[in-house]
Image (cartoon, helix red, strand yellow):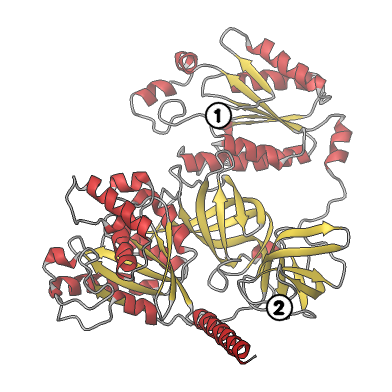
Amino acid sequence: MPHLHVVGDEKESANQRVDARIEAEEGRGLLRFLTCGSVDDGKSTLIGRLLYDSALVYEDQLRSAERDSKRAHAGRANELNLSFLVDGLQAEREQGITIDVAYRYFSTPRRKFIVADTPGHVQYTRNMATGASNCEFAVLLIDARQGVLTQTRRHACILALLGIEKVALAVNKMDLVDYDQTRFEAIAKDYAEFARPLGFELVTAIPVSALKGDNVTSPSSNMHWYHGPTLLGHLETVELGHEAQEGPFRFPVQWVNRPNQNFRGYAGTVASGTVKPGDEVVIQPSGKRVHVARIVTADGDLDVAHEGAAITLTFTEEVDVSRGNIVAGIEEPPQIADQIAARLVWFDEEPMLPGRSYAMRCGGQATTATISTLKYKLNVDNLDHVAGKTLELNEVGACNLSMGKPIVFDPYVDNTDTGSFILIDRFTNATVAAGMIEFGLHRATNVQWQELFIDKTARAGLKGQKPCVLWFTGLSGSGKSTIANTLEKRLHALGRHTYMLDGDNVRHGLSKDLGFSDADRVENIRRVAEAARLFIDAGLIVMVSFISPFRSERRMARELVGDGEFIEIFVDTPLEVCEARDPKGLYRKARAGLIRNFTGIDSGYEPPEHAELSLATRDTSPDVLAERVLAELRRRHVV
């Protein structure tokens, strides 16, 4: 019995040690940070140094890095490339640059860390923004030989936009400037002057050599003039204070959890605040108030759920809740608007065009959005606000956006989860921009639809016809206006009520302020599409004759009207035929360089992929083609 009693004591003591270890592990806290800066500033090498000096590299990783280092360095021994501990893609190791975001975990007795190694190449700025969006601290590297570069400034702007308030400025490769104190201080001063308007709460400049290890994990013997912390020491002790700043309760619904007929819950992750059973909450955008019945997890029900908890909520009352809805506290509900002001970082090689329709994702919410106004672009070299009509690749701007339906949101400064969104090209499905919401445009909620006694059906019935838009698209000189004119003459003879919107005629009035840049072409088509919708509402058959070179805008025009009311007609005439006709002499001027942005010459045309009608004009007269369109209208019971 005494022997068993000793074993029991040892088991209890072991359990206590395990519990103490777990409690100590949880108490250390977690810091998510990223490394960023211009290409070849040594970000991956710095992280590799942190991992290597902290003895946190697995043996197989080390062997792989040593093997690849020998290949990369022509067999020179004892020359470990520390960046290979982080750069995992073959292309990264071959080119010596970071392409994708690489996440690494490491820890010290004082703190746990998740570090995102983000690319510095301008082509991969979108990856840097993605990595930064999940971090709360940044290490911004600068090559001591190069100083502050444009990409350094761009990354600093993105950090500020994403709400990262504390930055360690690591002036790297000090060994290549002979550990010169004057050079370090000049770079730190240059960056401080640039970053002052960005509003960082703390910028700590640290001179380092990631390759040699100076001031990374231990103080450098080569820089006796520096008396500040090492980089690792700063990471271990920097105070973020985010735990104390608990915001109002926000719970974006990601999934309706209904495993059987006896259970219905709403799954997601708490974005901010806390929730307890019995709390009264509001479901947005419906505004319905309910009470929380249970907080369900895989490990059992909780008495309270905090920010970051993955949970399923059930409610006492029956209520309609779906993916994209936001459950919020009733004291401080989120905002709802269909127009917002936001900051955008543009990711796509195709420029942003105001008026073009993009898909929008804001958390679980999905809608369409157009940039109604580009208020200004940000010059990343001096932070000046610059006028412009478009955003190019990697540019930052302030915009007003109009959505297809209201979204639920908080300003980004209050809640990064409910205040951020992405824009997606609706044809390529590429993510073209990341946005941070500043505020809702309240004028959008003040303007209401006026109910009318006479509607489209009544107006069309009086005319004895079915309203629709006949959208003629094709190159200049293809014959669009000639066919549309001929068709309108036929319809008029049949007693039908019509109107024709012609590209040249509209330029004399409605669009007289627009040029022929891509951005102006998009705005021109947006205006015409809205005008066509009004004519349809009047019960008319509308003929629209415009080059309308972009599929996105033709799709936008189609979505403005009802099903079956938009008939796309592709006037399919080869460029050489159009150029031979050249009725206005425009092709000749474009070839001579006298006209810029001319469709078919130095501006592209995107032919329809699924037009309702395609008219080949090379060997067919306008009269015959107009009869074909008329036959299609009869088939659709328009006339």
- List x then y, in percent, for residue 507: 54, 36
Viewer-nearest of labels 2 and 1? 2
- List x then y, in percent, for residue 224: 14, 81
Residue at image position (52%, 59%) is 435
- List x then y, in percent, for residue 566: 72, 32
Residue at image position (52%, 20%) is 477
Disc 2 element? loop
Residue at image position (56%, 10%) is 618
Q: Using the rendered view, name the quadrant where residue 501 is placed.
A: top right
Q: Are marks 2 and 1 in contact (CB under 8 Å)?
A: no
47 or 275, nearer to the observer: 47
Against 588, residue 619 (above or below) is above
Relative to 66, is 167 on the left or the right? right
- List x then y, in percent, for residue 143: 23, 62
Residue position for label 1: 547
- Mark 2 is surrounded, within 10 Å at the Cα level, by few (under 14), some (14 to 19) or many (20 or more) other residues, namely many
Amino acid under label 1? Answer: Ile
269 or 370, nearer to the observer: 269
Residue at image position (70%, 71%) is 299
Disc 1 element? loop
The image's mark for residue 275 is: 2
Against 21, residue 361 (above or below) is above
